[in-house]
Image: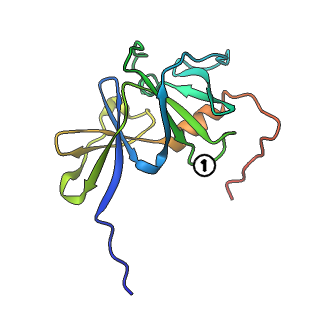
Amino acid sequence: MAEQPIKDVYSLLVPISGGKLIVPRTAVSEVMGYTPPHSRPDNAPEWFLGMVRWERSEVPLICFEAACGRGIPESSSRTRITYFHALKGRLNPPIIALMTQGYPYLVRVTEGVLSPSEKPEELEHAPVIARIRMANERPLVPDMESLEERIREFLPARSGDAEVSDA
């Protein structure tokens, strides 16, 4: 039986200050109300906001806008924490928390509504794979693998952490 090409991809548009991110629906584990982070590593950059509680673990909370060279938006009643699965699994637990400006919402992405767009020059060194055009939106595709590697630089080693080979 011949494989049918995938025609629709269910994705989430994640609101951030000044725009949106687009990610596969399965990339997001959970969305919760905003709680201020704690235990920020001394040597961490501005975008690494600190640690937040998730289930029975502490996970890193980051600000995507600050990782792109913009400021950290003020938290408001709309601010949420969106928990993403870490793709490389090199964090313990393999979760990254992102400060977002509302609830992600489901969109069906089809070939007819999607087209590539130029990556803006100001995002050249940002954790962004691309900007796409999708109907009236121009969301960013975040580079979650790059963020995971950046985060690892600032987390203290924990017992039970195993080095994962890239081989």
Q: Residue furthest right?
A: 159
Residue depicted at x 60% and y 49%: 88
User: What is the crowding at mark 1: few (fewer than 14 residues within 10 Å), some, or many (at least 20)?
Assistant: some
Residue 60 vs residue 22: left or right?
right
How many numbered dots are placed on residues in this image? 1
Residue 63 image offset from top left, x and y in percent: 47, 24
Mark 1 is on which residue type? Answer: Lys
x, y percent for residue 130: 35, 43
| Position in image of residue 25 (x %, y %) | 41, 48
Q: Which residue is mark 1?
A: 88
Left or right side of 39 for 113? left
Q: State the quadrant of the N terminus.
A: bottom left
Identify the residue at image location x=67%, y=54%. Answer: 166
The residue depicted at 22 percent of the width and 39 percent of the height is 137
Q: Residue furthest bottom?
A: 1
Q: Is residue 64 above or below residue 40?
A: below
Q: Percent from the top left, x then y, of residue 67?
A: 47, 26
Q: Is residue 159 left or right of residue 63?
A: right
Q: Secondary structure at mark 1?
A: loop
Q: For residue 53, what is the image quadrant?
A: top right
Image-quadrant location for residue 92 = top right
Image quadrant assignment for residue 142: top left
Q: Quadrant of the C terminus?
A: bottom right
Q: How is the image coloured?
A: rainbow
Does 143 sit above or below residue 52? below
